[in-house]
Image (cartoon, rainbow, N blue to C red):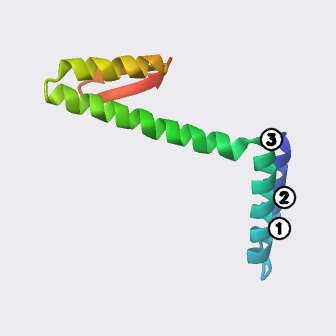
Amino acid sequence: GTAVLFDLVREINTRLTGESSAELAQGALGLLKELAGVLGLLQQAADAAGLDDEIQALVDARQAARKAKNWAESDRVRDQLAGMGIVLEDTAQGVRWKRK
């Protein structure tokens, strides 16, 4: 599985010298994307990044509701995040979130 990808990257790095490095890098990138796609790795990373953006947007919306003293909305967003498995920590430096 993923060990093959690491081996491929190591092999590519040892060969990336000289005039042909751009062509080799292009071909290697295509191969890495193909293999990672087969393993579902790139989609997982994209999904995780998108989910983190969604979580941060909800955290920001909750903060805006709190500043407006809209406690019902703040609680609703907090509950929505809790349903997603997200725990909020209100600190002096701001809100931090983590997965349960």
Sequence order check: which comes first, mark 1 or mark 3?
3
Q: Which mark is residue 15?
A: 1
Please tell me which residue is depicted at 36% across the width and 37% down the height of the picture. 57
Give residue 83's position: percent from left, percent from top. Answer: 46, 17
Which residue occupies 30% across, 35% down? 60
The percent coordinates of residue 16 (x first, y second) are 77, 69
Q: CA distance from mark 1 to mark 3?
A: 20 Å
In what quadrant of the picture does the N terminus appear?
A: top right
Reply above or below: 13 against 40: below
Identify the residue shown where x is 31% and y is 28%. 95
Crowding around mark 3 (Cα neighbors within 10 Å: few <14, some 14 to 19, many 20+) is few
Marks counted in the figure total 3
Type of residue at label 1?
Arg
Q: Is residue 89 visible?
A: no
Q: Residue 2 — which label?
A: 3
**Amino acid marked by disc 3:** Thr
Q: Residue at x 44, y 40 (%)?
A: 53
Give how far apart the Cα atoms at labels 2 and 3 are.
14 Å
Q: CA distance from mark 1 to mark 2?
A: 7 Å
Side of 76 where 3 appears, left or right: right
Q: Quadrant of residue 80?
A: top left
Closer mark to the observer between disc 2 and disc 3:
3
> Mark 1, mark 3: which one is toward the viewer?
3
Q: Amino acid at mark 2?
A: Glu
Instruction: State yes or no: discs 1 and 2 in contact (Cβ < 8 Å).
Output: yes
Q: Is residue 5 above or below residue 90?
A: below
Tell me the crowding category of disc 2: few under 14, some 14 to 19, or many 20 or more residues within 10 angstroms, Cα based.
few
Instruction: Say which element carries label 1.
Output: helix
Instruction: Out of 90 and 57, give the one closest to the viewer.
Output: 57
